[in-house]
């Protein structure tokens, strides 16, 4: 009998350990805390990016036009990457934006992604950029590998990580539109991103593709998660608890409040921010634009920010 009780107790502890290991992501998704990197910066762009202000910011944070950067193309299709003209065309594109020292990075093989040779370029880089495509391809190639560790190391030493479209969504902790069959499913067969920003889901091409209400599916399943939706040609620059909007359109914020700017009742020459708490079933959100700043931890629009 005593041996049976010990075996039963051991089995229960095993089940608790197994459950904890396999529900870590869901627990992290619902912590209610959102933070960016304490060292380094992120640039998270909404797709179809041509705005020189965003690329100039990336170049500045990386260390200038001669700074070594790594451009990750693995979100793209095999047909695109295998095209003989692919790297020639892409090299010309990056040079047109002033970059002079870049290396392209790609593999579909996780053993390769775990190799010292493959990660060498990242160890020398001060900037990493994720190209668009399908974000789940980045997960399949790099999640839980030395390559992902080296991406984090770029931030730890004060570098910058950027990305547009799929390269934006991958930076969140929850992977919006991560299904391998279609990008119309918000909650698909890949749900965990690289988590450079914690407890956040990031959508892209927001207004251009009329996606502004799609993210509520994720937020309903994970109450307390922050939602961010970025329109095309628009980005956020993230450091620590804060980000600033850069670009030509808007960023939608889904944080359980509604923010608007109104005239100060005591001084009509001044504009102040007014914040309203929303009920849990609300489908309201608000936009912020170029130059506006947001605190991820406090979940509020702020006025002061420094890079």
Image (tube, rainbow, N blue to C red):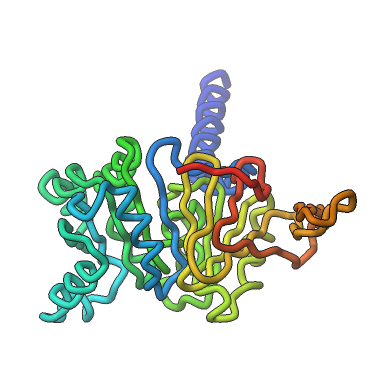
Residue placed at 59% from the left, 45% from the top?
Answer: 296
Q: Is residue 3 left or right of residue 144?
A: right
Q: Which one is nearer the viewer's eye here, 111 or 116?
A: 116
Q: Which one is nearer the viewer's eye here, 265 or 39?
A: 265
Q: Quadrant of residue 133?
A: bottom left
Q: Quadrant of residue 109?
A: bottom left
Residue 10, placed above or below residue 75: above
Residue 67's x, y, as percent? 20, 49
Q: Quadrant of the C terminus?
A: top left
Residue 155's x, y, as percent? 34, 41
Residue placed at 55% from the left, 52% from the top?
Answer: 200
Residue placed at 50% from the left, 35% from the top?
Answer: 17
Residue 52, placed above or below residue 58: below
Residue placed at 53% from the left, 30% from the top?
Answer: 13
Q: Residue furthest front?
A: 269
Residue 167's x, y, as percent? 38, 63
Residue 215's x, y, as percent? 61, 67
Q: Quadrant of residue 74?
A: bottom left
Q: Which one is nearer the viewer's eye here, 209 or 250?
A: 250
Quick check: can you spot residue 232?
yes
Quick check: can you spot residue 188?
no
Q: Is residue 55 left or right of residue 120?
A: right
Q: Quadrant of the N terminus?
A: top right
């Amino acid at each position: 009998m005593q041996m049976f009780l010990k075996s039963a107790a051991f089995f229960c502890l095993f089940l608790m350990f197994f459950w904890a290991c396999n529900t870590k992501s869901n627990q992290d998704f619902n912590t209610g805390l959102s933070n960016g990197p304490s060292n380094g910066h992120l640039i998270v762009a909404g797709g179809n990016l041509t705005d020189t202000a965003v690329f100039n910011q990336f170049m500045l944070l990386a260390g200038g036009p001669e700074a070594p950067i790594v451009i990750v193309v693995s979100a793209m299709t095999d047909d695109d990457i295998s095209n003989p003209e692919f790297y020639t065309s892409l090299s010309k594109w990056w040079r047109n934006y002033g970059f002079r020292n870049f290396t392209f990075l790609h593999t579909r093989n996780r053993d390769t992604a775990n190799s010292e040779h493959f990660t060498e370029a990242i160890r020398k880089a001060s900037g990493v950029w994720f190209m668009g495509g399908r974000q789940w391809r980045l997960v399949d190639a790099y999640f839980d590998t030395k390559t992902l560790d080296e991406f984090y190391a770029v931030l730890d030493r004060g570098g910058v990580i950027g990305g547009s479209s799929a390269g934006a969504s991958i930076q969140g902790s929850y992977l919006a539109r991560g299904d391998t069959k279609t990008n119309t499913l918000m909650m698909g067969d890949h749900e965990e991103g690289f988590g450079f920003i914690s407890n956040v889901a990031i959508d892209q091409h927001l207004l251009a593709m009329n996606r502004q209400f799609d993210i509520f599916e994720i937020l309903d399943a994970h109450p307390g998660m922050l939602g961010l939706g970025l329109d095309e040609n628009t980005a956020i620059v993230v450091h620590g608890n804060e980000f600033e909007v850069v670009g030509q359109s808007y960023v939608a914020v889904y944080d359980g409040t509604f923010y608007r700017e109104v005239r100060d009742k005591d001084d009509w020459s001044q504009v102040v921010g007014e914040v309203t708490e929303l009920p849990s079933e609300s489908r309201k959100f608000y936009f912020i634009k170029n130059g506006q700043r947001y605190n991820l931890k406090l979940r509020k629009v702020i006025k002061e920010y420094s890079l």
